[in-house]
Image (cartoon, rainbow, N blue to C red):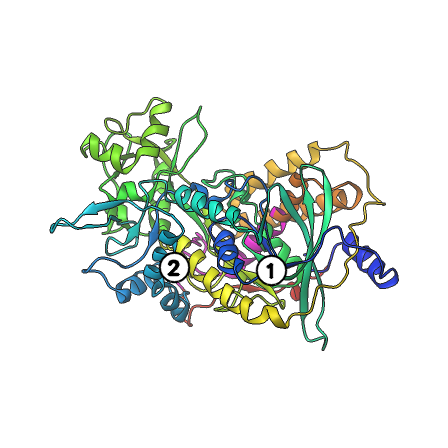
Amino acid sequence: MVAELSSKLTIAFYLQLHYPDVMPSSQPYDVLIIGSGGAGLSLSIKLADQALRIAVLSKFALTAGSTYYAQGGISAVFDADDSIESHIEDTLDAGAGLCDSEIVRLTVTQGKKSIDWLQQQGVVFTEELSPSGETKLHLNREGGHSHRRVVHNADATGKAVSLSLIQRAQEHPNIDLLEHHNVVELITRANADNSNKQVVGAYVLDSKKQKVKTMAAKVVVLATGGASKVYLYSTNPQSSTGDGIALAWRAGCRIGNMEFMQFHPTCLYHPSAQSFLISEAVRGEGGKLILPDGWPFMQHFDPRGELAPRDIVARAIDHEIKKRGIDCVYLDISHKPAEFIREHFPTIYSQCLDIGIDITKQPIPVVPAAHYTCGGVITDDLARTDITYLYAIGEVACTGLHGANRMASNSLLECLVFAERASEDILRKLPFIANSPTLPDWDESQVSDSDEEVVVSHNWHELRQFMWDYVGIVRTDKRLDRALSRVTLLKKEINEYYRHFRVTSDLLELRNLLIVAELIIRSAQQRKESRGLHYTLDYPELDNSKPPQNTILSPDNFRQ
C-alpha cells in the first residue's frame, strides 16, 4: 500500500527546497474544509465569525453530497418517555461492543443542542400537536431505537438541512464556497521538532478549468463523507468515493474499522429506474417486509422484526433472496391511510409514483445496498487526526460512536456534534499557528493527456463488481483473498496510469476507491469472527474469548 507522497508531490517539495521563491496558485486560507455536506458546512458557519478566511471545497455541486439525500432525520431525545441513558444504551447495543462509551455519551447529550442550532440556521422540522394542543416536534422511530427520537423534515431531512446551511454559508463574507474542486493530495511537512507531520495545504483539481491549484491553509479539515461507491449497488450519490480516507492514509493517518460497511436494507429495486433509498422511517411507521407471496419473514430472524438493527435486516433480506432465487423482497405500508403515507413520505411517494408504483396501494420492491461507512480516519474527541492541524468530521471519521454498526439517524447528529468540537479546538489554536509556507505549484511537466480513458471506466466497474460479490453482506476467507488479489493488480495499473497522464476527477476517485477497497479487505481479513456489519461464513459467531477489539491499520505497516 502506498503511504508516502506521490512522485509529483515529491517533485513539488524538491522545488520548494531549491526554488523557495516559487509562488502558490492562491492566497492562504485560515481553514480549508474539504467537503460541503452537513459536517463541512456546519463547521464553516461555526468558524466564520472568528476565522478570517475559510474555503469549503465541493467535488461537484454543493448539493451533490450524501447529506442532501438523507431522508430519515437526526436522533435526539425530546420525548418525556425517552432518556439520554436509553439513547446511549441503544447506540451501544447497535455497535456490538466496539463503541467508545465516552464518545457515545458526549454525542448523545448534545442532541437537543444540535437541533436547536439547526433551527437557528433556518432548518424547519416537521411538527405535530400534542394532546394539550401545543406544537411540538414530530418524532419518528427507526431501527435499533427503543423510542421515537428521530427529528425530521417529512422524508427529506437532509435536503432541508443542506439548503439552509448552504444559504447561511453563502451569506457570510468570510466563507468561499468552491464547487467542482477535487483534492489531489494533502501537503504536509515535518513539525519543528520532527515528532509528527503538520498539514499545510492541498493540491486541488479545478474540474471546470482542468487545472491543479496549490491551496495553502493553516488548518485542513476532511469532511468528505463515506465510501459506499466502492460497491456496485449503493444508496449514496456519485460523490461517495472515500476521498478523505484515501487522502489521510497516503498522508500517514491511521484508519480504523473499515470492515464495517453498512448496507441499508431497503433500496428501491426496479429494472428501469435509478435506485434510491426507501427510508427506515417507513418501517418505523409500520411498514412490513414481505415475500413475493405476501408473507412476512422478519419475525423468523429477530424478535424486533422490521425494527431490528440494519445489519440484521439486511442479512435477512439477503438470505431470503438467495434462498428463494428471487430478485427482491417487498416493503408494504399500504395498510396505512393514504393521507398518512402522502403526508409522512411525500418524496418516496412521488418518486415511486413516477415509475408506476402507488405505495398507498402497492408494496415497494426493495433490496439491500451499500449505505454507510462506519470506519474511517481515526480521530480523538476533538476531531483531531494523527497529523497536526488536520481534522476529520462526519462520515469520513472513525470517532468511536458507531462501533461495528451505525444506529439509524446517529450520523447527522455526529456531523453536528463533531463540527462543534472541531470548531472549538480550531479557534483556540488558530491565533498561534504560523502562516502557511510558500508552496510550489503542481508539476505537470512529465505527464500528458490520456488517450486511454477506457482504463479508468473499465477498472472502476470491475472494482465495484468484485467488491459486491466478494466483500459484501456475507463474506468468506476465499472471497476476501480473491478480492485482495484483484485490487492489488488494479492498484498497480492505476498507479502506473496516474504517473503518466494528467489527473481527472474520475481518475482521482478510482485511485482513492482502490485504496479504500484494500483497507476494507485487509480489515475484514483481520477479524476472525462475525460482529455487527461484518459477517463471515468461516467465523459465523462472536469471538467472546477476549475483549472486542477495533481494527486499526497504520500506513507504516503497509509501505511499498
Q: Quadrant of the C terminus?
A: bottom right
Find residue 104 and report its image quarter: bottom left
Secondary structure beneath label 2: loop
Nearest the eye: 245 or 535: 245
Instruction: Pick out the residue farthest to the right.
Output: 18
Q: CA distance from mark 1 to mark 2?
A: 53 Å
Q: Which residue is mark 1?
A: 52
- Up/down of 284 relative to 120, above or below: above
Residue 342 drawn above or below residue 145 = above
Of 497 and 355, which appears nearest the observer? 355
Residue 344: percent from the left, percent from the top? Answer: 27, 38
Q: Which mark is residue 541?
A: 2
Q: How many marks?
A: 2
Left-right relation of 16 to 460: right
Residue at 35 percent across and 55 percent down: it is 115
Residue 168, image x, y percentages: 47, 48
- Residue 208 lies in quadrant: top right
The question of residue 24 being in magenta is answered with: no
Nearer-N-terminus badge (1/2): 1
Tell me where the magenta segment starts and ends, as one range.
Answer: 513-542
